[in-house]
Image (cartoon, grey):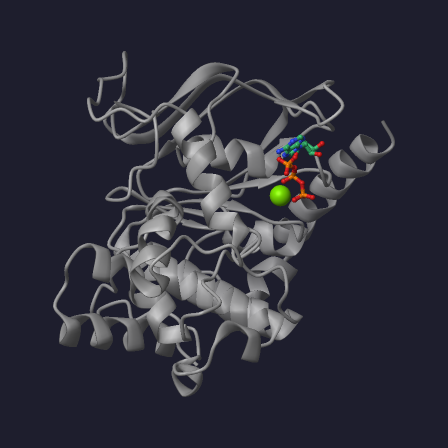
Amino acid sequence: MSLFHPTGPRVGSLLSGSIRQAAMTVARRDHGTPSESDGAPASTVVEARTSGPSAAPSLGPSFRSSEVIRVEHLAVSYRRSDGAEVRAVEDVSFSVREGEFVTLIGPSGCGKTSLLRVMGGLLRPAAGQVYVNDVLVKGPMPDAIAYVFQDFALFPWRTARANVEIALQLKRVPRGERRRRALDALDMVGLAEVADRFPRELSGGMQQRLAVARALVSNCGILLLDEPFGALDEQTRLVLGVQLSQLLESAGRTIVFVTHSLQEAVFLSDRILVLSHQPCRIKKTVEVPLPRPRGPDQVKSPAGQRIEAELFQLLYRESLV
Ligand SMILES: Nc1ncnc2c1ncn2[C@@H]1O[C@H](COP(=O)(O)OP(=O)(O)OP(=O)(O)O)[C@@H](O)[C@H]1O
Ligand SMILES: [Mg+2]
């Protein structure tokens, strides 16, 4: 299985926002009406609308050119069905340099997905702002950011190949090229054999890899990955992790990654942001100075083990809060 071809074709382009925003368009095109069976994309379209997308990008202040993402004093809150306010994220600031791999770890429910969704322009913050490539994020940015959702957000009525093709279709890429690029992306995640199967016919791990292929078909420089390997067995996780880091080194993509696996975090990251219990704040930033390219041996090295032990201690204390 080869996930990424470092020197091969750059597979297409599909962004978090574009998938979600495009969902209604795709559903209409496929069915004639928006789909009731796939609530996730449709509901996010509404949410993205409330986040006030604007066609007019505005330049962010004091932006260093190597910083492709800058998160400033971000806060996120939700209104629960009983009317109570949930403060999910509070005063979070950080930046991500071009080509950097930054991982967010923290207790379940602390606000990782909320943070990522604001960065992807899918959710309006209660306070603060995010800049991507000097542009204030006001809504999805399909040409800049690809997103892998924690819940996969696949279109159940489309085959695996057609799921990957969506973004290319919306960009009016000719049919033949679309098909070739989608098959390349499926091959990269080891799903070429099941290209004509529907999501319901795939295992949870295969659906997860399909969601990764859909993001990889993008030429986007920024990938926001929300637990993309969460449903995979340890070996497949490791293989995909190695290939993901190869892509990073060869293609210079900037990645913000969420995981609950400390080993995976150490293996993949340049920097790990350890988040606190809800409302989420940055508790500590841990640098991972292990040389690249990395292999499993580095994670098992004394330096790798020390970092993993530090992360464990930080999170253990956090889950006792
Ligand atoms: N739409 C919503 N309405 C109300 N509360 C929400 C909503 N979405 C998330 N929350 C709450 O906000 C908090 C943060 O949720 P979020 O999904 O960002 O956490 P997470 O860190 O990604 O969790 P996990 O590791 O389990 O995926 C949680 O307490 C969650 O219950
Ligand atoms: Mg989450």
Front-lying residue, 304 or 188:
188
Residue at 56% of width from left, 60% of height from top?
298
Displayed-image quarter of ligand 1: top right
Residue at 50% of width from left, 41% of height from top?
43
Residue 295, given in percent of the width and then of the height, sits at: 51, 66
Residue 317, given in percent of the width and then of the height, sits at: 82, 32
Front-lying residue, 238 or 294:
238
Quarter of the image for the N terminus: give it.
Answer: bottom left
Callout count: 0
Specify the farthest residue to the left.
Answer: 174
Q: Is the residue 193 above or below the residue 239 in the image?
A: below
Q: Is the residue 239 above or below the residue 284 in the image?
A: below
Left or right: residue 162 compared with residue 127: left
Residue 120, given in percent of the width and then of the height, sits at: 41, 36
Q: Quadrant of residue 163?
A: bottom left
Specify the farthest residue to the bottom.
Answer: 193
Residue at 26% of width from left, 56% of height from top?
13
Q: Is residue 264 visible?
A: yes
Front-lying residue, 201 or 137:
201
Quarter of the image for the C terminus: give it.
Answer: top right
Q: Is residue 122 visible?
A: no
Q: Quadrant of residue 319?
A: top right
Specify the farthest residue to the front.
Answer: 32
Residue 97, given in percent of the width and then of the height, sits at: 35, 34
Residue at 22% of width from left, 18% of height from top?
58
Front-lying residue, 195 or 309:
195
Specify the farthest residue to the right.
Answer: 320
